[in-house]
Image (spheres, helix red, strand yellow):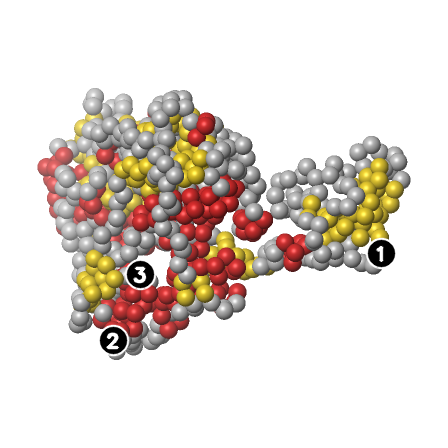
Amino acid sequence: MKFTLAWLKEHLDTDADANAVAEALTTIGLEVEAVERQAAALAPFRVAHVISAQQHPNADRLRVCKVDAGTGEIIDVVCGAPNARTGIKAVFALPGTFIPGTGITLSKGMIRGAASNGMLCSARELELSDDHDGIIELPQDAPVGMAYVDYAGVNGVVIDISITPNRGDATGVYGIARDLAAFGLGTLKSTDMSPVPSAGASPVAALPHQFAEGEPKAIRKFAGRVIANVKNGPSPHWLQQRLRAVGLRPINAVVDITNLVSLGWGRPLHAYDLAKVVGQPVLRPAREGESLDALDNRVYPLDGTMTVIADDQGPLCLGGIMGGIRSGVTETTTTVLMECASWDPDLIAQTGRKTGIVSDARYRLERNVDPALTEPGLELATRLVLSLCGGEAMAPVISGEDVFPDTSIAFPLSEVRRLTGLTSTPDEIVAVLSRLGFAVSGEGPVRQVRVPSWRPDVTQKADLVEEVMRMTGVDSVPVEPLPRLSNVAPRMITGLQNRRRIARRLLASRGMVEAVTWSFISEADARAFGGGDPALKLANPIASDLTDMRPSLLPGLLAAARRNQNRGLGDIALFEVGQVFVGITPEGQRSHAAGIRSGHAAMGGEGRHWQGGRRPVSVYDAKADLFAALDALGIEADKVQLVAEAPDWSHPGRGGRLQLGPKGHLGWFGEIHPQVLEAFDIDGPIAAFALDLGALPEPKRKATRAKPALVLSDLMAISRDFAFVVDRDVPAATLIKAARGADKGLITDVSVFDVFAGTGLPEGQKSVGLAVTLQPAERSLTDKEIEAVSETIVTAVAKATGAVLRQ
């Protein structure tokens, strides 16, 4: 938001200079981004008199001018402007001057054989407008030799501030002045917005609202007024300079007035050439297939969620965003329909995002414009048009009802001290709020505060505290050290937060790279991983391929792997710890850890090596990553059930699930299904896992943090091998569990060393070789004791699985 210091002082009676104003603005939360001299680059340009302008002897379109620039000598200048003629006053640049509109620095030279020692400048060359049809002509009383910025009055100070989304009241110079007056920097000046007498009945009826039940209706209230017999044309010099100073191009008096009211009072308006309106204008939703040829010379397709002002031939204006060329006001316009409307900020923002239009009107309306200014803003614009363009104002027409935030807050004055530490007295607090326009009533420690119409963002007592604090000054908030704790601080993070931290460290230590992917994915990707629930579809996605909340972290990781493969990085290991969404309730938002390995990116390394090629990744790599994460999180692997049921995204028979009971699913692992790989356009193999961190049980808290004494046996461990014949569909894990439980005091480890199926075995059976480690603690085992333990192992495995020893 840009404005000049002179413009501010038209609303604020103050002697403060630019530095004081900038400091005050930052203090009250309107952060100053820049303070710059207006048109500082124009300082070298001066007023000059063209004494004579003769035809160039060697060029038809050039003239050789004699120019008096107040330097004490007559300067020869070659000029090609069609309006360069004897006797005019113009803007002149001496050699060595930088021309901002062209980016060049002038130098003396010869043009077609004639000396040229300077330049007579156009408005575009000075970046004052786009006009390049001729040089700038100044009045005959312009003093020769005077700096142009001093003569034109464009040597003021421009202040640029940053407006937060909640401060729609600060999008106008008047609102900024109101805040500074409340801060104590001056006195706010009033603006005459009283009704303008009407010269007759309006030729346009109140605009009908043609909205069906349930259709989006961005407009709340429409106020319009016809002004007849207008003599439009260029706006006065002071108005043009005011708009140019803040980066707007003057167009004509009527349009410039709408921009003046928008910037000055934060109240956007729009003007229509009534002669170009066909039939009765109406307010309605846009229809499918309609488009708007807008004032920025672009055509925008419209849809039924957008509100338009239309006539019999179609849309005239995209409501609250931008007008159309067809009804645009030009210098030949004689009858103006001036519109000042109130809009729904959320729907304006939605329309703006869909069309991509970033206009001054949208910028203000999506931040909430004071609804109380709808009709007064129309009266102000009418008064300015009558003053600058003449004409006759007809009776205003009003349709619709506005929405006024009738907010009243019970405000305990002690909240200021509690939330900020400021020691303001009750009288000081009430005075600050009153100066800001809040109506404070009641007595005692709790006051009733009514919020003004221009501050709909203030809804609770904490907001009132913020208002008091920013007017008192954030620098006044006392800085106090935190109290020193006399004991060890308790754990500050939750168990789930700690699991997320541990999972990140563990997976990174296994050679995987952390990725952060979108929480939004396409519907097809969501369905591939168990999602696609309509309830989890975004109402207003930021892109057409980001429509659904992700049900898994794996789609994002696969997309990242695809991008790396496309750039020649086929061997990659990625992981992510983040949120997934399986329902719309709070319980449906889960915290997961997931990882993928592609190509040859196994735990031992990646790529090829001269000593031998690395094996491609497999289901066992994903399983190893998953079990390593469980171990780091304090979950004992033998306490978890391993089920050979591959998830839908996994290759059949190459995946599994970890669980604590039938419904306590903890994690999944497997090789990505070929159809999923094809859908993601990515080469396999890819091994993946996912772990639900929120489903893990809390580890048992130990009575002490000290590690127990290390107990090692000085007796030699004994290893015995067993080969069992069992049905092929019996998992090896079942045999391991049964063997381990045969004697928990002696058996310290059970592992599979061989799996065989084929010749010599009955159909449908396999041979599983188990290596069992026995570790005596007190004395060496005798052969008889070893044999007894072996028989116990065979019996336990047979009972659990039906297996028999292989002969």
User: First in sequence: mark 2 or mark 3?
Assistant: 3
Is the Cβ of the residue at disc 1 closer than 8 Å to that at disc 2? no
Q: How many marks?
A: 3
**Quarter where residue 96 is shown:** bottom right
Q: Position of residue 102 (x, y in %)?
A: 69, 44
Q: Residue at x 43, y 67 (%)?
A: 186
Q: Amino acid at mark 2?
A: Asn
| Residue 74 located left or right of residue 419 | right
Which residue is disc 3 drawn over? 437
User: First in sequence: mark 1 or mark 2?
Assistant: 1
As rendered, which of 356 and 157 lies closer to the eye?
Answer: 157
| Residue 5 located left or right of residue 352 | right
Question: Quadrant where the C terminus lies?
Answer: top left
Q: Is residue 300 above or below residue 44?
A: above
Q: Residue at x 46, y 27 (%)?
A: 276
* Secondary-structure class at tag 1: loop
Tell me the mark number nearer the camera, choosing from 2 and 3.
3
Which residue is disc 2 drawn over? 487
Q: Is residue 41 above or below residue 381?
A: below
Disc number at residue 73?
A: 1
Q: Residue at x 80, y 58 (%)?
A: 71
**Quarter where residue 791 is shown:** top left
Tell me the mark number nearer the camera, choosing from 1 and 2.
1
As rendered, which of 687 and 696 lies closer to the eye?
Answer: 696
Q: CA distance from mark 1 to mark 3?
A: 61 Å
Specify whether residue 358 is in view: no
* Secondary-structure class at tag 2: loop
Q: CA distance from mark 1 to mark 2?
A: 86 Å
Q: Amino acid at mark 3?
A: Gly
